[in-house]
Amino acid sequence: MALVFGGVEGGGTHSKVVLLTGDGRILAETEGPATNHWLVGVDKCIETTNDMVQRAKKEAGLDPNIPLRSLGMSLSGGEQKDAIDRLIIDMKRRFPNLSQDYFITTDAIGSMATASDRGGIVLISGTGSNCKLVNPDGSQVGCGGWGHVIGDEGSAFWISHLAVKMVFDAKDNLATPPHDITYVKKAMEEYFQVSDLMGMLPHFYRHFQKSHFAGFCKKLAEGAEKQDPLCQYVFTQAGTALAKHVEAVLPSAQEPLLSGEQGLVILCVGSVWKSWELLKPGFTEVLAAVASSEKFKGRFHGYSLLVLQQSSALGGASLGAQSVGATVSLDYAANANVFYRHAFNSSQ
């Protein structure tokens, strides 16, 4: 039988597994809850992964007791080497029939491997945020990805936190909000099912759940679509923050990334990008300023924003196969679509 390769897309809210053959044929796909080991713990991460893979094996008509050739895992929180090594050791010990070999990388790198083999920038804005520049020679430079306590700028959690904080600051007379808080305060009370600010404390501390807190972002997006100025403001701020990540990694970009036909390729991953029109004012303003700066004037000609049409589990599977000397064929053109292009004029 042909070798079977597995890939995992592991996020802070939900996860996905795909099984495929070397020619890229998808045999099965399954979904499950969060597998960010920093959020759910190592044991829960590997148990969820095993459950998804074994369900996928059954769906594909495979023997659950025969290990995959490799399992490539594209995980949010998949940065730290010691933690990755522990994950692999524990998976091999607890679930020896899961896979022969493992490869674990970040959700950013897995996403880029799904969309292109030529490099670009991956800009994640989902529950959390992260940014990675991948050069054509494989070298990488990152910005962000430090989690909600110290970062996650421009993410759903960050947007939710910014809006809620402005309500609290206004009520405390600590800071004057840029716009009226009435809509956001009411939406906050309805979403979190509280009647006053004190009711929010369990959501901040005792019963804090990052994914649930981040879910408030959807209500803010609805408010922005209804033209509430404060909701629109927090999304503009998020667009600015996300573009600042691009600005941070851009000095490390090799020339082919800037001179390609599509300009700089920026792969946008995460549910916050569904609100692109709300992010757009802040995002485009920052990159326009970068293009006109002395460092990039005449070099940064434009950019294309792409969104994945397929799960980053495909990229994880491809990287996992490469790690054992095999290859998985991916249709990059079908895996990502351009949803926005911008070219800077020659005077910038």
Image (spheres, rainbow, N blue to C red):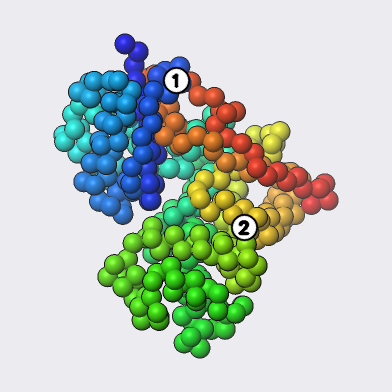
Count of number-bearing discs: 2
Residue 326: x and y, percent?
A: 39, 19
**Which residue is situated farthest in the left direction here?**
93
From the viewer's perspective, is the residue at label 2 or at label 1 nearer? 1
Residue 240 position, x and y percent, is 61, 61
Q: Position of residue 20 (x, y in %)?
A: 40, 23
| Amino acid residing under circle 1 | Arg
* Viewport quadrant of the N terminus: top left
Q: Is residue 264 visible?
A: no
Q: Residues within 10 Å of mark 1 (few under 14, many from 20)?
A: few
Counting residues from the N terminus, which is met first, the one under dot 2 or under dot 1? Answer: 1
Residue underneath mark 1: 25
- The residue that mark 2 highlights is 279
Q: Secondary structure at mark 1?
A: loop
From the viewer's perspective, is residue 117 above or below residue 264? above
Residue 236 in the image: x percent, y percent? 62, 63
Please determine whether, in this image, residue 327 is positioned above or below residue 141.
above
| Residue type at tag 2 | Leu
Residue 23 located left or right of residue 85: right
Q: Residue at x 70, y 43 (%)?
A: 341
